[in-house]
Image (cartoon, grey):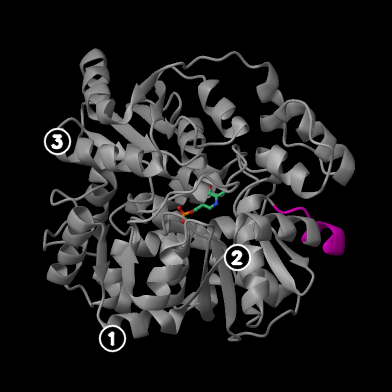
Amino acid sequence: MKYTSTRSYCPTDSLKAVLNSIAPDGGLYISKDILNMSFDWKQCLKLNTPDMSKMICKALLDDFDNIESIIEKSYKDRFETKELTPLVKVGKNYVCELFHGPTCAFKDVALSVLPNLIVSARKKAGFENDTIILTATSGDTGKAALEAFKDVTGTKIIVFYPKEGVSEIQKRQMITQKGSNVKVCAVDGNFDDCQSAVKQAFNSIKDKGLASANSINIGRLIPQIVYYFSSYRDLLKTGEISQGEKINFAVPTGNFGDILAGYYAKLMGLPIDKLICASNSNNVLTDFLKTGTYNRNRPFFKTISPSMDILISSNLERLLFLLSDGNFNFVSNCMTELGTNGRYSVPQAILAKIQESFLFGSATEEETQDSIRQCYYQNNYLLDPHTAVAWNVTQKLNSGKTVVLSTASPFKFSTSVSKALDLSCQGSEFELMKALSLKTSIAIPKSLSELENLPVLHNDCISKDRIVEYVRKELDLWI
Ligand SMILES: *Cc1c(COP(=O)(O)O)cnc(C)c1O
């Protein structure tokens, strides 16, 4: 497959797309070939999850010649469950649990693979210098990336997180991170500030081997396609659907990476009817999908689903590219307008195409809490606040068989979840975690309970306009 930037024609292959992460013109790497590729999706549905992943990654990252061993190595003993992402029936819907990896968030599915892709691509490209992974996080990417890259030879990783913008547990997961090649830094700003500064660092620091672990990296996006297939397979297996029947997926959305992977699955032939884009109070995407105008000039809310507190959804750029049939001018004009005026509008024809594949909706804070409570007391199933946003939107739309992607363990957000259940909310996050476990009889994931006694190893905190400088300084120390 040929890869290019979304903003101008700059042909490259999947190895370089993964290594460079972001194109020289600031665009994202993408292959137009996905629009008319032939993929034997029926055959894919016969496989177990790791084998599905091999088949999908092989098709889309076809310049890697060792995908099978990469996937094998990536998932070996990293997930609690052999099938990686189990599907459970909840009420008249289904939940695909993506949080059984080492950091209890869906990002583990792709970030388990990314380091091995990078190491393999470096080898093939004959890289001698270390690859420096720069990551902005809204809470979960940071820890998943740290855990994935720690002590991986030839790589170093720096994670920036918004100081007040992540949950207590998410923060503790990051500041207690061990590893000789990791650096974690708090930023006085929000996720968009962190992500913009990281993109700026990519543009201004060239030839130093920077790479990204965010979903702007195509190597992050592609391994996420697999659970759309595995969910469909599981529904077939249990007789909930018949072969070829179209289903919906509801996706708690922030940077538009997870849901874009679903769109890829649809393009590859998987019978998906609608992808439901669910937002919290930061509902910039809901408005865009409804009106065709993307406008980030609006208040930024800190919510109980912090990993979705995002006003600049980077991966939308890739959707615009695909829907305009690879129109570089169109995409780059939109992105220039977003940069200068904070808004852009797409033509009616593009909006119509978007609405063919996407439904949308948002949940307020109150609705999110109501959904956690109702789902628990009606179905005996505990949702985390991100999943609850998608659950809420799914209930409101009520449009056919839907798989809700569950993106995090509820124990990562014990304060908000126990509040929603009306448990008396006192004590530390860890006490609340235990209370929640007692109430629900669900075991606390070990990687979360052990955080309580781990020493804090990272205390750096900087203002948002010093991120690039911080990166330069670390590079000087390291190289
Ligand atoms: C990252 C994240 C999301 C949003 O995913 P995107 O790919 O950024 O849209 C949703 N829920 C949780 C728990 C996350 O960590």
Is residue 424 in view from this perspective?
yes
The residue depicted at 81 percent of the width and 32 percent of the height is 434
Position of 19 compared to 73: left or right?
Answer: left
Residue 88 % position (x, y): 74, 63
Q: CA distance from mark 3 to mark 2?
A: 40 Å
Label 1 environment density (alpha carbons within 10 Å; few <14, some 14–19, many ≥20):
few
Q: Which residue is mark 2?
A: 230
Q: CA distance from mark 2 to mark 1?
A: 33 Å
**Helix, strand or loop at disc 3?**
helix
Front-most of 145 and 382? 382
In the displayed structure, would residue 344 be above or below residue 140?
below
Q: CA distance from mark 1 to mark 3?
A: 36 Å
Of marks 1 and 3, which one's residue comes earlier in the chain?
A: 3
The residue depicted at 25 percent of the width and 55 percent of the height is 28
Badge number at residue 349: 1
- The segment highlighted magenta reads 375-383
Ligand 1 neighbours mark 2 (CB distance < 8 Å): no
Label 2 environment density (alpha carbons within 10 Å; few <14, some 14–19, many ≥20):
many
In the displayed structure, would residue 47 be above or below residue 107?
below
Quadrant (top left/top right/bottom left/bottom right) for the N terminus: bottom left
The total of numbered circles placed on residues is 3
Q: Residue furthest front?
A: 299
